[in-house]
Image (cartoon, grey):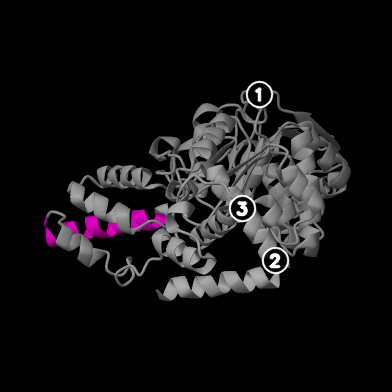
Amino acid sequence: MADSRPESEAWERIATIVRRSVPRQQFETWFRGISVVSVGPERLEFRVPNNFLREWILRKYSGVLRSAAREVVSGDPELVIHIAESADSSGSSSSGPLPGATPSRDADAHRAATAPRSAAEVHTSTVSARSPGISFGESDVTLNAQYTFGNFVPGPSNNFAYAAAVAVADSPGKSYNPLFLHGSVGLGKTHLLQGVCHRLIERRPGMRLLYLSCETFTNHFVTAIANGELDSFRYRYRHVDTLLIDDIHFLANRERTQEEFFHTFNTLYNANKQIILSSDSNPAEIPTLSERLVSRFKWGVVARIDAPVYETRVAIISRKVKMHGVTFPDDVVHYVAENIRANIRELEGAVNKMAGMAHIYGRSVSMEMAKTALRDLIPISQHRVSVDTIIRTVAEHYGVPVKDLMGKRRTKSIARPRQVCMFLARRLTSHSLEEIGGYFGGRDHTTVMYAFDKIRKEVKVSTDLADLVEHLSTRIRTT
């Protein structure tokens, strides 16, 4: 119901005049947090949620407010702005949208960012609950209700990343700051970021939370520069409790955006605010990323997510099947797990397709249906590169026995070709580090990662080795 008090009516007229005097984004950012206390010829009295907003309005917009007031009330009123102490401190003051303000995602975010933590509300898209203080309006990302920690399937390839994300959600800003998750597409980075969001919304309803893509951060920064609104931009990003940015590798080749993010990072980190980032690459492997950002991204915890191992794939499929309320025979579950290895997203797509077909045709899922449904997802006879093929090809080139490459021997004549095998297996197959290590005498994932990094670095400086790797890759793919 609209507020019919005289001061509210006067404020509506004042706000309408102010809106015509300042750019829309400035109005949405700085004036939506105002609630009216009293309006008269001698005194304009408002309430705002914090001291920063009070000082900013007094310094930047007091003249605009008083000028607008002079058109509405007689006299030259004094401007007085109080700071709200709690959700109840505003009494009967107006709390609805300002006159002429068009509701928007940005407007909701500005209101949430500047409102008292115990009072502000903003809708969170797919999240059904209204969560005080949670700010998603700046983002192009909506929360998926299924992306919770409870629906995440941990395994050898993601256990550390999962544990770190849970720890951060339980104690933001106190450990693992920043948390940097990296891995290929479709492996669960976004699921973990959104899991953190869901946990924080549930357990810390007053938290100021901002979750968005790096592309959105960049676009907002460019727009702020063009419109001369850097102060507003910086306030928006540097006054949050937790900042989550997906695909931070898009900072590559953007020097000025990197500079801005560097200062945003420092401000939040020094204030013990939580920063969570995701990328398809390790910080050191993001091209043209400044050394000082690389260094800061490593200050906390860098957690790699690999493709799920076979047992984890089976668990993921079983979980997705249960969520669909259907039943897959064991042989179908194992068929999907064996043939779709690259990422979790493809596994979800396979389950969705089979569940959809079962519903449409009114039949139970069978192996025949599975093979029909997955025909497009599994390339012709998979023509998948196998680790066995890689080992045989490398052994033939180096003239060493296959059993020695797959055994425990550590002699130099065996170590080098074994490292090449591991490098090619990592590059040409979708096997996890643990699975690759299993082919070579049960070596652990750190050994495989060391071999991969060693050969990868040498390929960059040795033309001979680069040519050899390319030659072997071609032979393996065509075998």
> Which residue is nearer to you in this view: 434 or 392?
392
Kind of residue indicated by mark 2? Lys
Does the magenta stretch mainly form a helix, a strand or a loop?
Answer: helix
On screen, 91 above or below 112? Answer: above
Q: Where is residue 157 in the image (x, y as percent from the top left)?
A: 47, 43
Q: Is mark 1 on a helix, strand or loop?
A: loop
Observer-side mark, 3 or 2, equals: 3
Q: Mark 2 points at which residue?
A: 460
Q: Is residue 218 left or right of residue 108?
A: right
Kind of residue indicated by mark 1? Ser
Q: Name the residue under label 1.
A: 86
Q: Is residue 202 left or right of residue 211?
A: left
Q: Mark 3 points at which residue?
A: 412
Q: In this view, does 355 lie to the left or right of 229?
A: left
On screen, 257 above or below 433? Answer: below
Question: Marks 2/1: CA distance?
Answer: 60 Å
On screen, 262 above or below 172? Answer: below
Task: State which tag comes first along the sequence, 3 or 2.
Answer: 3
Q: Where is residue 197 in the image (x, y as percent from the top left)?
A: 53, 39
Q: Is residue 448 left or right of residue 144?
A: right
Q: Give the range drawn in magenta.
A: 345-363
Q: Check the picture and name the quadrant holding the C terminus.
A: bottom left
Kind of residue indicated by mark 3? Lys
Question: Marks 3/2: CA distance?
Answer: 22 Å
Q: Where is residue 130 in the image (x, y as percent from the top left)?
A: 49, 37
Task: State which tag comes first along the sequence, 2 or 1.
Answer: 1
